[in-house]
Image (cartoon, grey):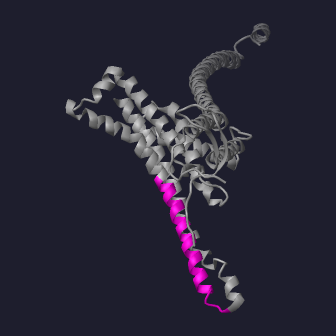
Amino acid sequence: MEFDISGAKIFARIPTGIPVLGDILITETLVVSWIVMLIITGLCIFLTRNLKVEKISKRQAVAEMIVEAATNLVRNNTGGTKFDNLIPFVSTIFATSIVSNLISLIPIFRSPTADLSTEASWAILVFIMITANKIKAGGLLGYMKGFTEPIPVMTPFNILSELATPVSMACRHFGNILSGIVINGLIYAALAIASGALLGLIPGAVGDFLSHIPILSVGLPAVLSVYFDWFTGAMQAFIFTMLTIMYIANAAEG
Amino acid sequence: MNTQPLVTLVPWTMIAQFLNLMIQLFLIKKFLFKPVNDILEKRRQLTDQAIREAREAKEEADGLKTQYESGIAKAREEAARIMQDAQREAQGRADDLVHEAQAKAAGIKAQAEADIAQERKKAINEVKNEIGGLAMDIAGKVVEKEIDEADHKRLIDDFIKNVGEAS
């Protein structure tokens, strides 16, 4: 039995001829991302229909709860209302991340977060915001000078640690989602082999036929999926969000 | 179908994902945060307004209350004053009545005394006249034999005349 895990499927390739950027690939990642966006936007529109001041519906209560939870999360972690304009961004990251992670529960979709490009673009964006906040807080000179502290010898290490921030953020998220996919794939493959071996013990054509049905795959993967898909998916979205808030808040403090 | 390597960085995908995130940010802002924050703000304003109105109403009520209380106090004072006046007036009238009655009683008493005095005087006079007549009678009887018929006649006439004058 062959078992391999590949990257996202490429549906179309648009050659651009630009040397560094290369061809535009319409991959599973992008298509599922659009589906994720549709889901989130649709949910937002659904939740905020018929908003009322009094006697609110359950939908509106949920919408208000989400907004208040996001607001409180950012305010509690930055200690004030200074970063209120960050709330929608943080919520967007969280929502996109968690829906992207969990959409793989529907077997035909592959998580967009199972493609390093996705996390890399988010992490680079966050890195740009961190840097922008640092420069805004201490000026360009202060930002540059920050690398030579506490002693100038540390400069390369400081630069390295600065660059490690987006790399670690992207790889942490990607690695967790990928590991879920890998482990799920392995479990399914292993269970298929196990049930093939088990049912192959039945002699004759019946055994031959039944051994192709991975009967043992029913049940156990669902239990494991609670951790590898649900928990990891939610956890990584939350971690990425929290790190975004923390890094930006710290950067602005100078 | 082709697949891309398991771990790879595709520049265009990164750009696309960045743009997707920005579009998603815009959509979430537009469809979730803006309406919900608007409604929250509206509710906050409504609550503030309700509180403000309640405070104003309370202040107004307090004003009215002090006004009423002062009014009631004034009215009570007025009532007390009127009562006092009435009492004083009644007292005065009662005193007047008593005085008047006393004066009248004194007048009646004086009149009665005067009447009594006059009656007494009159009675004494009558008694005096009676005694005079009787004395004359008795004197006439005593001297009857000594006087002659003519004198006798003249005396009787005098007597009758006197009696007539006296009565």
Q: Which of the 4 image quarters holds residue A50?
A: top right
Judge whether A249 appears above or below A59 on screen: above
Q: Residue at x 59, y 55 (%)?
A: A102
Judge whether A179 appears above or below B138 on screen: below
Number of marks: 0
Q: Which quadrant does the C terminus of chain A fall into?
A: top left
Q: Which residue is at the front of the view, B74 or A237?
A: A237
Judge whether B16 appears above or below B125 on screen: below
Q: Which of the 4 image quarters holds residue B26?
A: top right
- Secondary structure of the magenta portion, mostly? helix
Q: Residue at x 20, y 33 (%)?
A: A153
Q: Which quadrant does the N terminus of chain A fall into?
A: bottom right
For the question of whether residue A208 can be seen, the reply is yes
- Expressed as whole percent of the image width and height from the top left, the position of residue A113 reads 55, 49
Q: Residue at x 31, y 25 (%)?
A: A144
Which portion, as a residue range, is magenta?
A: A175-203
| A63 in magenta | no
- Expressed as whole percent of the image width and height from the top left, the position of residue B143 reads 68, 15
Judge whether A43 appears above or below A140 on screen: below
Left/right placement of residue A140 relative to residue B17 reads left
Q: Which residue is at the front of the view, A160 or A224?
A: A160
